[in-house]
Amino acid sequence: MITIIETQQFTGKADKIMSAAEKDELFDFIARNPKEGDVISGTGGVRKLRFAIQGKGKRGGVRVIYYYYDDRNPVLLFTVFGKNEKSDLTKKEKNILYGIVQDIKKEMKS
């Protein structure tokens, strides 16, 4: 199974909208299925996963933004938000993630 790393932004938001059990379930799911999320264009490979939380299905649940490089490296969880909070990333957010991913790719290849 793949290691999961949470950013501070992810942890702060997840703690507000997900229970500890839901977070554990999410981590287990992503560790077993890192390619499950849809690749977001313009981000260099960042993925968006719809994930159901209590009382809401996948469509009404949370959106998890993360980066998966390969099976030998950890998955990096960038952020999470409810569907009612926002529907997608802004162009600015995508550009920021693209820059971060390029730096990660350089490090992974070293």
Image (spheres, rainbow, N blue to C red):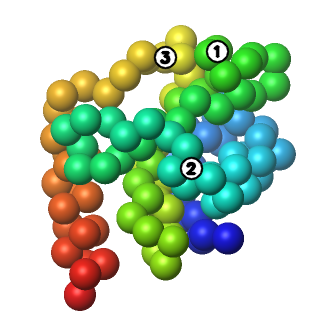
- Dot 2 falls on a residue whose secondary structure is helix
User: Which mark's residue is nearer the viewer, 1 or 2?
Assistant: 1
User: Relative to residue 69, is residue 21 drawn left or right?
Assistant: right
For label 2, the crowd category at 10 Å Cα-Cα, with few meaning under 14, some 14 to 19 and many 20 or more, is some
- Dot 1 falls on a residue whose secondary structure is loop
Q: Classify 79 as above or below 8.
A: above
User: The disc labelled 2 sits on which kind of residue?
Assistant: Thr
**Quadrant into which the C terminus falls:** bottom left
Whether residue 8 is visible to the viewer of this picture, yes or no, is no
- Dot 3 falls on a residue whose secondary structure is loop
> Which quarter of the figure has residue 54?
top right
Q: CA distance from mark 3 to mark 1?
A: 11 Å
Q: Which residue is mark 2?
A: 11
User: Relative to residue 100, is residue 1 drawn left or right?
Assistant: right
Q: Return the disc, 3 or 1, that comes first in the chain's sequence.
A: 1
Q: How far across and down, in percent of the image, does residue 40 sit?
A: 32, 36
Residue at 37% across / 40% down in the picture?
A: 39
Q: Classify 36 as above or below 105.
A: above
Identify the disc placed on residue 60: 1
User: The disc labelled 3 sits on which kind of residue?
Assistant: Glu
User: Relative to residue 78, is residue 71 drawn left or right?
Assistant: right
User: Which mark's residue is nearer the viewer, 3 or 1?
Assistant: 1
Identify the disc placed on residue 85: 3
Q: CA distance from mark 2 to mark 3?
A: 16 Å
* Residue lying at the far bottom of the rendered structure: 110
User: Relative to residue 77, is residue 50 drawn left or right?
Assistant: right
Q: Return the disc, 1 or 2, that comes first in the chain's sequence.
A: 2
